[in-house]
Image (tube, rainbow, N blue to C red):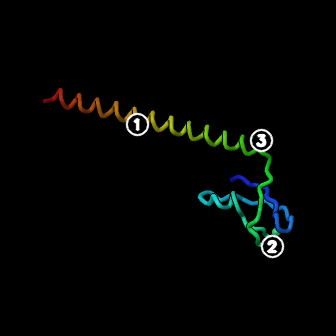
């Protein structure tokens, strides 16, 4: 789970926020633990963010590729099944 650094614009308090999966708002506007303001700004370097998102999209691509391989394999098996069925009739 990624941890992002934030800075509160209301009181200047800097804090780290664990970004929860399925809770994108925790990555965007977490409330300040010092003053509860949601006027917070992420201070993590752009470099770190882009490498993280690049890794994420690479992961998703790999996942997609694996899925299509599985679909292709199932299709092949189905074709064989149909061909076998036709042979018997
Ligand atoms: Zn604050």
- Secondary structure at numbered mark 3: helix
Circle on res. 49: none
Q: Is residue 59 above or below residue 6?
A: above
Residue tagged 1 = 71
Q: Which image quarter is the C terminus in?
A: top left
Q: Is mark 2 within 8 Å of ligand 1?
A: yes
Percent x, y for residue 11? Answer: 85, 68
Q: Residues within 10 Å of mark 1 (few under 14, many from 20)?
A: few
Percent x, y for residue 22? Answer: 59, 58
- Secondary structure at numbered mark 2: loop
Which residue is found at the position 50% from the left and 36% from the top? 66
Which residue is found at the position 57% from the left and 41% from the top? 60
Q: Residues within 10 Å of mark 2 (few under 14, many from 20)?
A: few
- Secondary structure at numbered mark 1: helix
Residue tagged 2 = 35
Q: Is mark 1 within 8 Å of ligand 1?
A: no
Which residue is found at the position 65% from the left and 61% from the top? 25
């Amino acid at each position: 789970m990624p941890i992002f650094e934030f800075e509160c614009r209301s009181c200047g308090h800097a804090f780290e926020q664990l970004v929860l999966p399925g809770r994108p708002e925790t990555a965007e506007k977490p409330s300040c633990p010092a003053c509860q303001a949601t006027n917070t700004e992420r201070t993590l370097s752009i470099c770190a963010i882009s490498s993280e998102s690049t890794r994420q999209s690479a992961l998703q691509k790999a996942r997609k590729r694996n899925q299509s391989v599985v679909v292709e394999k199932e299709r092949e098996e189905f074709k064989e099944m149909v061909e076998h069925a036709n042979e018997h009739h």
